[in-house]
Amino acid sequence: MPTNIRLDDCLWIRSKNAELQPVFRPMMRSLLKRGVKVMMLDVSQRAEMRGLRDQVWKSDQHVILQGLLPRELNAIQPIFARRKNFSIMPIDWWLTPFWYSQNSTFNIFHNYNGVAVRTGRAPFLTGECPPWLLIPDRPIPYEIQSALLRPAALLAAPFLELWKWRQRSMALSDPGRFLYFPFPIAEEEVPLHSEAPRYDFTSMGSVTGPWLMRDPFAPAWLNFANLYADRRRLIDLIVQLDGKPFIVYDRRKSNSWLPWEELTGIIRRSRFVICSGGLQNNSVPKFLEYACLGVPMIGTVLPFEYPWLVRCLVPVKPMSVTKEELKPILEEALDRHPTLRQNCLAVRDTLLRLYHPDALMDMLQAQINGLPVAPGYLTEAAAS
C-alpha cells in the first residue's frame, strides 16, 4: 500500500448533509486549523460539480471522501472513474457502493466492525437477528418506505445474495487497505456542568435503523430491517416501568427537534442513558458523548472498540431480557450509580485526549505509514 500519502496535503470532500450533525463539527474545525483543503459538496449544484471535476483532474492530489451519502457518491463516480487516487471514509460503511470500496486506496472505517467483517474475523451480525418485518417508529417518509419495501426485500434476498457472493469473490482483501478512524469528540461539544438528577433512565437515541445494504459483506436479507430492534425493545421495557418506581424520559414522546444544548442538558440531568450500537455492534458516537458528559449507560458493550466502556455501562441483553428480569437489574444499577458516574468522570480527560480530532488524524496517518492502531482504542478481541 502507498505510504507517501499525507492527510494534511489531501483534498477532503465532505457532504454538506453531514455538517448538520454535531459529531462532525470537531473534525471540520480541526481540518481548517491544520490548513487542510476542504470542499463541501452539494451535488445538486452543477457549478460545484464542474468545480470538483476541474480541481481533481488538474492535479494528482489524493482525495478523501468523508461522510458522503450513496446518492452523492453515485453522482461523482464519473469524475473518479478513470482518475481513482482517492480513499473513502463513510459514516455507515454498509451503505458504500461496491465500486468505491473496491477502487479506493484505503477504506477508512469509523466503526471497527467494518474492519472485522471485511477481514473475515466477524460476521455482520454476531448474535440476535432483527424482526422479519419493520414497524415504523415515526411517520416520516423513509421509515414508511422502508417498512413497505421490507417484504419485497426478503423475497429478493436470495437472488441479491448471489450477486453479493460474486462481488465478495472479487473484493480486494488486503488488510492494509482497511484503516480505523473512530468518531471524534471535542470538549466544547460536551460541557460538564453540575446538575441535579431529574430522571433515572433516559432514552435519546433512534429506535428504527433500516438501511439498504450496498456493501457485499452486509447480508441482503437485512435490507430495510430494523438493526436498532435491540434498542427499541430495551427502551420499550424500561418505559413500562415508568413510575413503577423509576422516572423515565423517552424522547419519542416529543416530536419536536431538540437543540444540542437542550439535549445535552437532559442527559446531564439523567442518572443513566440507554445506549446500544444496534444488532451490528455499531460504535455510535453516543457512547463517547454520554461518558464525557459524566452519565453512565444501560445497554450493550462493543466487542472490538471502546475498551473503557465496561467501566461506564451496566450490560444487559436487550433481545432476551424480560421485564421481570430487568427491574432488579435497574434497581442494582441505581445503587451503583455513584461509582459508575465517577468512572465516567475519571475517564473523561483520557477520552477527550484520545478522541480529539488531531489525535485521530495522527493515528490515521500512522496507519497509512504502516503502524498499528495506537493503544487505548481497541479491545483485546480486535487484536485476536
Image (cartoon, rainbow, N blue to C red):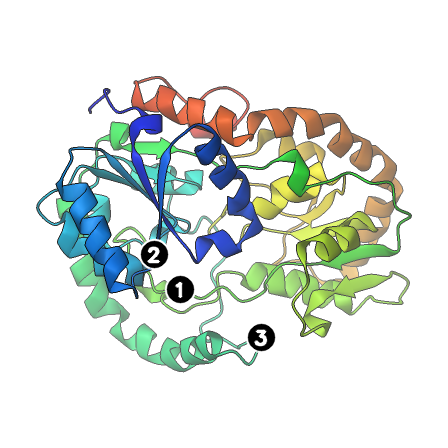
In the image, 96 versus 361, the foreground residue is 361
State the CA–CA distance, disc 1 to disc 2.
7 Å
Q: Is residue 195 above or below residue 46?
A: above
Q: Can residue 279 be spotted in the picture? A: no
Nearer-N-terminus badge (2/3) = 2
* Residue type, label 3: Asp
> What residue do we see at 13% from left, 43% from top?
57
Q: Position of residue 205 (x, y in %)?
A: 62, 59
Say which quadrant the N terminus sits in.
top left
State the CA–CA distance, disc 3 to disc 1.
15 Å
Q: Position of residue 306 (x, y in %)?
A: 57, 33
Identify the residue under disc 3: 137
Residue projecting furthest to the left: 82
Nearer-N-terminus badge (1/2) = 2
Q: Is residue 350 above or below residue 116?
A: above
Q: Position of residue 277 (x, y in %)?
A: 55, 50
* Residue type, label 1: Trp
Q: Are marks 2 and 3 in contact (CB under 8 Å)?
A: no
> What residue do we see at 67% from left, 54% from top?
260
Identify the residue under disc 1: 211
Q: Position of residue 361 (x, y in %)?
A: 43, 27
Q: Can residue 25 be spotted in the picture? A: yes
SS at circle 1: loop
Nearer-N-terminus badge (3/1) = 3
Looking at the image, residue 245 sits to the left or right of residue 355; the answer is: right
SS at circle 2: helix
Identify the residue under disc 2: 95
**Picture quadrant of residue 43:** bottom left
